[in-house]
Image (cartoon, rainbow, N blue to C red):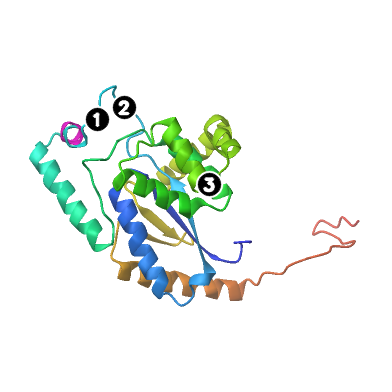
Amino acid sequence: MSTDNKLHIEVWSDVVCPFCFIGKKHYEQALAQFEHADDVVLEWKSYQLDPEFVQPEERYDLEQGLAKKYNRPVEAIHAMQQQIVNTAKESGLDFDFEKAVTFNTFQAHRVLHKAKEKGLGDKAKEAFFSDYFEKGQDLGNTDVLKAEALRIGLTEDDFNDAISNDEYAYKVKQDIQEAYELGVTGVPFFVFDRKYAVSGAQPSDAFLNTLKASYDDWKAKQKTTPFINVSEQGASCDINGNCD
């Protein structure tokens, strides 16, 4: 199904970003209340919070790792995570940071691009979020990542193509570069029709208000620049006087 004549929403996010999963739920709550939801299409974009992360041989302790990275006491990190767990519960999510296996998300993003290509982008994003935050799945393990890719509907050939074809590595890097050019400094970052933005896991009301405003502008733009579908084309002349 073509999405050319839809209100386009882009979301930059990372699989290991808790507020990206929470923000997804808040957006979905808003969309469920939006009367023109059928006119909206959402596209997930890649972003890496820690592109240099290398998983150690021994199990990575998330609290210890974050405490070291941000030079904060472990107790402060634990309190922060508990607050996130509570916020997630309000959105119907069951986070378990004790089970979470931290990994470099680059390969997962490659698979997400393949899933998007196959019309499974949102399903894959939801699955990978849940795998990390709720199920303790190690998506840094190629076999686990493959099993999850197959579970959401990709084929073995799809998966192998995603992790070996440089095209998908390029797509991930392109998204990240685009985020940099847009001035994105944190995720989730929702962009509505390249005119409005919602940064972070805002309440569903904020998403609903932005949906309404961006839809009204988008609809007005559709009226002033009507789309003409040219199904056949015969002989014509261009503005330079060339005729054929």
* Viewer-nearest residue: 150 or 88: 150
Check the image and report above or below for 144 versus 19: above
Badge 1: how crowded within 10 Å, few (<14), some, or many (20+)?
Answer: some
* Residue named by callout 1: 60
User: In the drawing, does residue 86 fall left or right of residue 27?
Assistant: left
In magenta segment, residue 196: no
Secondary structure beneath dot 1 equals loop
* Labels 2 and 1 touching (C-beta < 8 A): yes
Secondary structure beneath dot 2 equals loop
Name the residue type under label 2. Gln
User: For the stretch drawn in magenta, what is the main secondary structure?
Assistant: helix
Residue 155: where, in percent of width, then height? 58, 41
In magenta segment, residue 67: yes
The magenta-colored residue range is 65-70
The structure residue drawn at horizontal position 29% and vertical position 36%, both measured from the top left corner, is 101
Secondary structure beneath dot 3 equals helix
Displayed quadrant of residue 87: bottom left
Name the residue type under label 1. Tyr
* Residue named by callout 3: 115
* Residue named by callout 2: 55
Cα gap from disc 2 to disc 1, whole angstroms: 7 Å
Toward the top, the furthest residue is 57
Residue 126: where, in percent of width, then height? 41, 52
